[in-house]
């Protein structure tokens, strides 16, 4: 505790780096995965390619990907970009699959009603399909967020700053306290991100909060007594 | 950091001499250098080390997680505990646990601290896979077996396990993948395995070695995952295949490759 207080600025600094490397891939993955999932939904060939490429990339170990990417991207080995790109790849691979499931689970009669009401395809996707997929999308995001927070620490093996630095530094200085601070910090960060995602989901899916679940049960039973 | 790695007791491979500065051709030259495929620190030896650590980790993890998963899945007792425990373990950064265990262990070079930290990584997917596989078996089938007079043990091993095997193996498969990936990290605490090439290569700025080692790790992981996918198909009863083709084929994709 004493060490933690004395080194608070450094720990906070590392936490900041850590958060950036974990959050940016999360945002990027949504931007990339949602259109890919929609493409996979409407096109059988694209679906095969996207899903198998996703599971193949997902199999590449992170430490390997972290050091392979610099030579592909032309970045320095110490560049944040490598971590962000690598984690984005994993996140997209995972998110495409769950977004596809989510989009497939949207009731087709809803789509048809929207079309009948005069929605254009893009408009319908953004205001009907996508919002109804949000719960599943967020379930995927929460899984990714936890694993991202943990994966970012591996970058410290290459010298990229994150809370993982406390692990490598603690080992070298033979100082367990520092490692424990790192572990607790990582866990708290994962918890914090999870809470943020839950709150964000509640904010974006207000219809799920009213009553037990209007969307899941037939309308007749949802009418309040 | 690099200064310390250089002082580690493991000697690196004799360096490959490169005829190019391009990282890709350096990686290729490293991979095709016969020097790296023979001798006590060569790629085949490192692969064996890598597989050895992974195998030991998985043996321990299966011995811990499968009985608990079977018990919870069969009886339904302790479900909430298992689910939340597995979730918590997932958030643990393996690198942190590994360095902590290595420091707390008496001898800095012993293998078991690393293995135990990997066990913490492998237990959640196996545990939740086993539990979910058993719990997902149609209760009517289980009741039918019970009404036919099967004992609880017969129900578990004769009905529930064969029916839940696909999901159980899915959990095992993702555990194998995570362990294979993460074993690369144990090189940091002075053990062997394929991660040595990355750590040593970084320390001496031999990027051909780093890249070559990374490619070997990736190919190993992809190959073994493919092998397990085939195995999964072979072991699961053909009667279940038609039923399984309808819903999602893969078990929920599992996160974390650290």
Image (spheres, coloured by chain):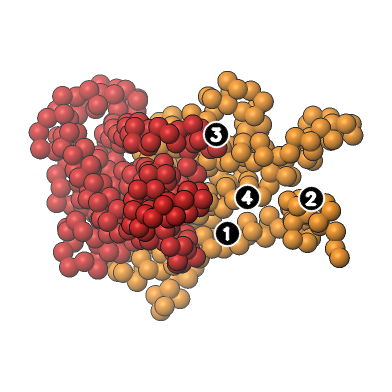
Q: Residue A138 carries which label?
A: 4
Give the letter of the chain under mark 4.
Answer: A
Q: At 15% across and 47% down in the image, what residue appears?
A: B10
Q: Are marks 4 and 2 on the same chain?
A: yes
In the rendered image of this protein, does residue A20 appear above or below residue A38? below
Q: Distance between the residues labelled 2 and 1?
A: 31 Å
Disc 1 is placed on an element classified as helix
Disc 2 is placed on an element classified as loop
Q: Distance between the residues labelled 3 and 2?
A: 25 Å
Chain represented in red? B
Disc 3 is placed on an element classified as loop
> In front: mark 4 or mark 1?
4
- Residue A9, how many percent across, how many down? 49, 68
Quarter-of-image position of residue B208: top left
Read off the residue under disc 2: A218
Q: At 49% across and 31% down in the image, what residue appears?
A: B242
Q: Which of marks 2 and 4 precedes in the sequence?
A: 4
Visible residue check, residue A221: yes
| Chain A: colour as depicted | orange
């Amino acid at each position: 505790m004493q060490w933690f207080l004395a080194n608070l600025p450094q720990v906070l600094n590392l936490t900041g780096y850590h958060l950036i490397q974990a959050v940016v891939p999360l945002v990027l993955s949504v931007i990339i995965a949602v259109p890919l999932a929609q493409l996979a939904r409407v096109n059988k060939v694209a679906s095969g390619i996207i899903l198998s490429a996703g599971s193949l990339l997902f199999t590449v170990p992170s430490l390997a990907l972290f050091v392979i990417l610099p030579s592909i991207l032309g970045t320095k080995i110490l560049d944040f970009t490598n971590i962000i790109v690598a984690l984005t790849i994993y996140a997209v691979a995972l998110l495409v699959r769950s977004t596809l499931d989510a989009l497939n689970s949207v009731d087709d009669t809803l789509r048809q009603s929207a079309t009948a009401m005069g929605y254009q395809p893009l408009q319908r996707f953004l205001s009907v399909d996508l919002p109804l997929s949000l719960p599943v999308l967020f379930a995927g995001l929460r899984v990714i967020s936890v694993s991202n927070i943990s994966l970012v620490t591996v970058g410290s093996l290459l010298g990229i700053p994150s809370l993982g630095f406390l692990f490598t530094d603690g080992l070298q200085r033979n100082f367990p306290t520092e490692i424990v601070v790192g572990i607790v910090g990582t866990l708290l960060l994962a918890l914090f991100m999870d809470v943020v995602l839950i709150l964000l989901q509640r904010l974006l899916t207000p219809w799920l909060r009213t009553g037990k679940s209007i969307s899941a049960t037939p309308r007749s039973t949802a009418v309040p007594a | 950091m690099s200064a310390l790695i250089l002082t580690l007791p493991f000697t690196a491979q004799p360096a490959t001499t490169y005829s190019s500065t391009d990282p890709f051709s350096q990686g290729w030259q490293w991979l095709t250098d016969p020097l790296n495929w023979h001798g006590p620190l060569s790629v085949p030896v490192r692969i064996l080390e890598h597989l050895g650590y992974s195998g030991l980790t998985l043996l321990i993890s299966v011995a811990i997680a499968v009985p608990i998963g079977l018990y919870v899945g069969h009886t339904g007792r302790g479900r909430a505990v298992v689910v939340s425990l597995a979730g918590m373990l997932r958030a643990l950064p393996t690198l942190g646990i590994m360095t902590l265990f290595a420091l707390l262990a008496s001898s800095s070079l012993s293998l078991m601290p690393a293995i135990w930290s990997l066990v913490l990584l492998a237990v959640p997917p196996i545990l939740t896979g086993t539990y979910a596989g058993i719990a997902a078996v149609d209760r009517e089938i289980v009741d039918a077996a019970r009404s036919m007079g099967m004992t609880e043990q017969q129900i578990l091993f004769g009905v529930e396990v064969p029916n839940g095997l696909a999901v159980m193996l899915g959990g095992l498969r993702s555990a194998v993948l995570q362990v294979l990936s993460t074993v690369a990290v144990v090189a940091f605490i002075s053990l062997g395995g394929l991660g040595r090439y990355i750590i040593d290569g970084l320390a001496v700025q031999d990027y051909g070695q780093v890249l070559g080692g990374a490619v070997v790790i990736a190919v190993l992981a992809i190959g073994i995952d493919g092998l397990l996918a085939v195995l999964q198909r072979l072991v699961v009863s053909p009667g279940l295949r038609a039923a399984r083709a309808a819903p999602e084929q893969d078990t929920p994709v599992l996160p974390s490759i650290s």
